[in-house]
Amino acid sequence: MTSTTKAWIAAAVAVVFSIGLITWQVKARRADAVNLTGDDMALVAEDQPPQFRTRLASDEAARKDFAENLRSLLAVAEEARVKGVANKPDIKRQLDLVRAVVIAENFFKSQGAPAGAPNVSDQEVEEFFKQPGNTEKFDQFINDAKAKNPQLASGQIPDEQIKQVRRQLGQVLIGERKGIAAGVNKQRVVELQIMLEQARILAQTYAQEQLAEKMKATDQEIDAYVGQHPELDLKHNRGKAEEVLKRVRAGEDFAKLAQEFSTDPGSKVKGGDLGWFGHGQMVPEFEKAAFALKPGEVSDIVESKFGYHIIKLEERRATDQEGKPAEQVHARHILIGEGEQADNPFGGPPKSGRDKARAAVEQEKQKKVLEEIVKRSHVVVADNFQVKMPEAQQQPAMPPGFSPDEHPAGEANPAEPTKGKEKAKPADSKPHKK
């Protein structure tokens, strides 16, 4: 199956599962209880990517986590079925479609067809769509895809792309029909694949449509969390910045204070040194304060979206930029913010204290609710199972001189990470920049 087909099918079936938007609504009645044995879990594990399989094969804790994640997914899917999510016409079509995809892929694989190249002729596809009801299935597939993807709905789909998708969907449905005739759908590994893919659809739909709004943190909950974590309160940071500024004014070494207190990971290791910069490179509040200083002067506390800055100007100089005179300054700063921007190491808009509190409250609420869903569900998943270590992948032969162990003396091994060298970062990677 080509990437184009998978993109369209993904748009139609929406098989992404968001575990963070889950809650318990009603007491689940016993539907078709799921019971995954140790043998079932071994089959599911073998269907995972090689790197993850290696971890599962060698780490008992990873296997237990894997089982717990599946248990959570299936428990929410069970609740979704109880609430009637699977009976909605569009969801039922998604469940049928993903079942067809799994059966077809396994059938083509059993026939030795290369990945993405089902052995179905164009003539077979044309004959398939001449049969009653099959053209209507394709039209409905397109409508479902547009409903899931606004970009598809807002534009005219090229005829050539429509033909390609029609051919590929026909191959899937023909493969499903042939797979059922061959008994592929009754293989346990195929049943498990269908179960898990359908569970993702049900869980995501249930979470998005019925639970997301109820899992939001209230203002009262956020206030209470901030009260328990004063480091998230802007007033706390302001007070800390004022204390550091007093020590600077008392004559303590600015660079050492930056190394001790600054939350700017890019400059604190260099004693707060920002190097040379000109107009337009920093956020406005920082730039205005820095260019107003004289060499050797220290600013008052400067507030920006990143927190509170204490700036020390080292030098000024005049330069030429594109033939025009320009001014640059060399400065240091101490940033008192909300942690060392660990939530966003590559820059971008920082999170406020309330944003972090909101995320923490919602994460805790979601965790508790998910535990309750699992506790009340009828899902049983074995966490004691064995996983076969994947076979080593044969590496393609490399031309002479390109092997990881073959590189000229004195040059870095291109197959190893560069050590001791600073990697290029986006222009806004430092928290003081725009």
Image (tube, helix red, strand yellow):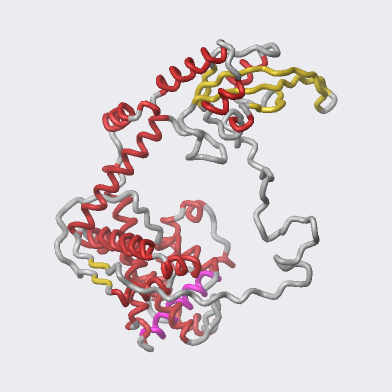
At horizontal 70% and vertical 75% (from top left) the residue drawn is: 397
Q: Position of residue 49 (x, y in %)?
A: 48, 68
Judge whether residue 201 can be spotted in this image: no
Closest to the observer, 297 or 290 = 297
Residue 164 shown in magenta: yes
Q: Main secondary structure of the magenta part?
A: helix
At horizontal 26% and vertical 52% (from top left) the residue drawn is: 370
Q: Position of residue 174 (x, y in %)?
A: 44, 81
Q: Position of residue 180 (x, y in %)?
A: 36, 84
Quadrant containing the C terminus is top right
Give the magenta part as a residue range: 163-180
Identify the residue at the far right of this view: 323
Residue 286 shown in magenta: no
Identify the residue at the far bottom of this view: 182
Closest to the observer, 206 or 306 = 306
Asked if 141 appears above or below 422 in the picture, the reply is below
Judge whether residue 158 can be spotted in this image: yes
Q: Is residue 422 left or right of residue 110?
A: right
